[in-house]
Amino acid sequence: MKERFINVSADADQRQAERFEIWLSGDGIPFIDAEAKAAYRERVTLIKDAIQLRQIPARIPICPSAGFFPIQYAGITMYDAMYDYAALKKAWEVYHQDLEPDAYNGPTTIVPGKVLDTLDLKLYKWPGHGVAKDREYQYVEDEYMKAEEYQDLIDDPTAFFLTAYFPRIFGALKSFETLPLFPPLNEIPLVPPTFMRFGTEEMQSSFQSLGQAGEESLRWRTAVGEVNMRIMGNGFPSFSGGFTKAPFDVIGDSLRGTKGVMLDMFRFPDELKEACERLTPIMVKCGATACRANGHIMPFIPLHKGADGFMSDEQFRTFYWPTLRKLIIGLINEGMVPLLFAEGSYNKRLDVIFDIPRGKAVWWFDRTDMKRAKQTVGQVACLAGNMPLDLLCTGTPSQVKSYCKSLIRVAGTEGGFIFSSGAGMQGSKAENVKTMIACAKEFGIYK
Amino acid sequence: MTESLIYAMVEMQEAEALQKAKQLLDEGTSPMKILDACSAAMEAVGKRFEKGEYFLPNLMMAGEMMKQISAILKPLLKQEQTGTGRGKVLIGTVEGDIHDIGKNIVTFLLEANGFEVRDIGIDQSPQKFVEAIGDFRPDVVGMSGLLTLAFESMKNTVQAIEAAGLRETVRIMIGGGQVTEQVKDYTGADAYGPDAVVGLRLTKEWIGGQ
């Protein structure tokens, strides 16, 4: 098979420039006035300069991860936000109006509860459905794929997801167990045996649920689209335009589970590596397609199972990094800037993740030592993050202020830094969030 | 005799470890002695973890080996031999949080080291912790939580334990996700563990005097 995603393509710079142009143009955004449009372009330029490492931005852009913070800030419950789109829109508007971070995080992670109800999703518990109405949705750890199913996943990921994974994670799609294989459908005798599967009552009921989930998702999308346009129209660019994951995390998070994937590194190392390779082009497409559709450049990539402590350095180099690097290169070759969100700490990974082309990615850290990060991966990529959640949740504004100053001193020198929280800000005190944003704007000006 | 079993477990050789355990049993080694060897192996694995040579997957794999070997040995052990009385630990994930991986690893490490552990599960209210303390009378209480919202639940639980007049009877440790010294102070717990092995170490310090 042809090796892909190893080297940066010759036109990567050109393609990145084109994508930045599209993002910068703000085409399609209903700006309220010329001033808002200028403010939008100014903010995109701050982020662009920080990313490209060619020139020092006018100041450090402040782009915290809103997480579920706007919900508590608006005084509504997580249940309200997931079931009442008007309440969701209002919460997001209030948060952005009051706090004015430089970039906008749309409420794309506040998924519509009715869709989950209709599909009977088993992967998560959500407010009113397994957790209290004021609590956030949470993942239910399990082995949704058995260890002996690696070969099925490798042979045909799409068939595996359709006929094995979906029936397990969506109660309403149980009938998909009987879906046929599609590639054989290329000769006339295979038409009836293929389509008869769609005639059963169970299958038709599944399709009805899909239709309902689709309609509800569109209603949600319309609501989210409205608030997105209104906030962007006031001059705030969106911080990301798509979503994808490291291939290892696709398997480790929600196919095999944490324990499953950790044991697989000892028991089924070859199958695990091959499955990661198999998923790589799909995850490249996932991030690039969404960004293109949204006129954006940064796919958000939350990283989970590769953090310090979750595996040894050798395991990181063997199982996690090779296909994550391919994902990064694949996206860069599409002109994208991967927004790599490394939750937990990455101190032991800095010398490995350093191996990427310059000025083409953002490494967003949570609890990583930012001084070392700046000396290593900070030389090739824009850094972001690190405002600690424990401080935002339980600290005082003066503690927040002094941390902000030292973070800017350590990570902000010579550009290449986006000020951000270490993780989604749920649970933070509002006064601390306000202090953080004000401090970043005040102390983040390059002289 | 048991050295090769210990070696296989410490070196993460699952198939060899199981085979060695069975072989020892066939050769007439007492089940208790084999179990002691497993505990010695677990201790060595824990040491490597503390030194930064081993990581979570190693703890998980060691746990798997221990579980499989114990399953073979348990029916052969007399009841009184399985119960150990090193001290009691109550553990649970706090209200509003359903994550259990960290809690389960700490539980396993404590049990492997001879502590009696009662795991009350996930999403446990302050009241449930208080009731379980009253009933089980633990020396140590461990609270787990991955979410930032768990900070508040941990604080409420510590307060409820205090209000019930039980605070002086237990040492409280917290752990998980974003938990730090700052959070420890906020919640009123006695200590926090950035990883599972620290949870074990704290318990040993508090109970075993080791």
Image (spheres, rainbow, N blue to C red):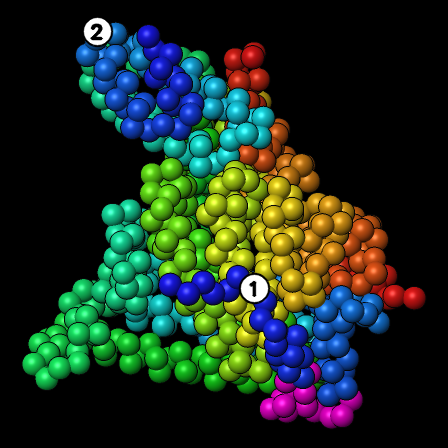
The answer for which chain carries disc 1 is A
Query: Residue at coordinates 75% horizontally, 52% vertically from top-left?
Result: A374
The residue to which callout 2 is attached is B28
Is residue A233 shown to the viewer in this render? no
What span is colored magenta in the figure? A22-35
**Residue B6 position (above or below residue A116):** above
Could you tell me the amino acid type at mark 2? Gly
Relative placement, left or right, of B60 versus A134 is: left
Q: Quadrant of the N terminus of chain A?
A: bottom left
* A64 and A115: which is toward the camera: A64
Relative placement, left or right, of A200 versus B113 is: left
Q: Does the magenta portion include A227?
A: no
Residue A7: give its label. Answer: 1
Residue B31 in the image: state x and y as whole percent: 26, 11
Q: Does the magenta portion include A31?
A: yes
Query: Residue at coordinates 86% horizontally, 66% vertically from top-left?
Result: A445
Q: Secondary structure at mark 1?
A: loop
Residue B57 in the image: state x and y as whole percent: 44, 37
**Which of the 4 image quadrants contains residue A198?**
bottom left
Q: Secondary structure at mark 2?
A: loop
Residue A308 in the image: state x and y as whole percent: 57, 42
* A22 and A214: which is toward the camera: A22
**Which of the 4 image quadrants contains residue A174?**
bottom left
Query: Residue at coordinates 46% horizontally, 47% vertically from top-left?
Result: A319
User: Outermost residue, right direction?
Assistant: A447
Q: CA distance from mark 1 to mark 2?
A: 60 Å
**Residue A164 position (above or below residue A115):** above
Could you tell me the amino acid type at mark 1? Asn
Residue A58 in the image: state x and y as whole percent: 84, 72
Label 2 environment density (alpha carbons within 10 Å; few <14, some 14–19, many ≥20) = few
